[in-house]
Amino acid sequence: MDQAERRALIDRYRAGYNVVVAALEGISDEELDARQAPEEWTAREVVHHLGDSEMRSAMRLRQLLAEDEPLIQAYDEPEWARRLHYDRPIGWSLDAFRAARASTSELLELMDESDWKRAGSHEESGPYSAEDWLSIYAFHAEDHAEQIRRARTG
């Protein structure tokens, strides 16, 4: 990945919170809980997922930077949704999402070439570098913002 590609992905990552907030603008409680299909998440569930997954992703990057050859753990997202009460109000999860993105964006700006090459292993997908991390999470919020827009329509 060259510096221009990396810069574009960092900018996209940094903008992700605002993309999600825009998708939630004016949302009603009814829209927060609308479900397009039985197996699909509601907008409320998506926001809680973002809070949890973005905190987890922030720690993954920190593991990659601070540990030698870290093992990145997978987790069962549907089980987290069931056990972590994804039917609760969304405010704190939005705050967690915002804080994880803001703190990590600052860290991304300080990384040098050797940081970007640091790698470990993801227990499900194998080799996993800081660049792999960025390639995934640069689009994570946008993908879920689209999911929120679809879920709002029920």
Image (spheres, rainbow, N blue to C red):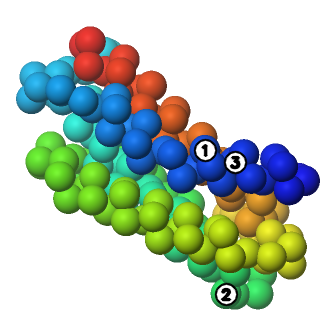
The three-letter amino acid code for the residue at tag 2 is: Ala
SS label for mark 3: helix
Does residue 117 appear left or right of residue 21 in this picture?
A: right
Q: Are marks 2 and 3 in contact (CB under 8 Å)?
A: no
Q: Which mark is residue 9?
A: 3
Q: Residue furthest top?
A: 153
Q: Please name the residue shown 68% across and 76% down the image.
A: 110
- According to the picture, the residue beneath numbered tag 2 turns out to be 66
Q: Earlier in the sequence, mark 1 or mark 2?
A: 1
SS label for mark 2: helix
Query: Can you say whether 132 is above or below 110 in the image?
Result: above
- Quadrant into which the C terminus falls: top left
Q: Residue furthest bottom?
A: 67
Query: Can you say whether 21 is above or below 118 in the image?
Result: above
Dot 2 alpha-carbon crowd within 10 angstroms: few under 14, some 14 to 19, many 20 or more: few
Dot 3 alpha-carbon crowd within 10 angstroms: few under 14, some 14 to 19, many 20 or more: some
Does residue 85 appear left or right of residue 146 in this picture?
A: left
Q: Please name the residue shown 78% across and 53% down the image.
A: 6
Residue 98 image point, x, y percent: 37, 58
Residue 152 image point, x, y percent: 26, 19
Q: CA distance from mark 2 to mark 3?
A: 22 Å
Q: Please name the residue shown 51% across and 35% down the image.
A: 142
Q: Earlier in the sequence, mark 2 or mark 3?
A: 3
Q: CA distance from mark 1 to mark 3?
A: 5 Å
Q: Are marks 1 and 3 in contact (CB under 8 Å)?
A: yes
Query: Can you say whether 20 is above or below 50 in the image?
Result: above
The three-letter amino acid code for the residue at tag 3 is: Leu
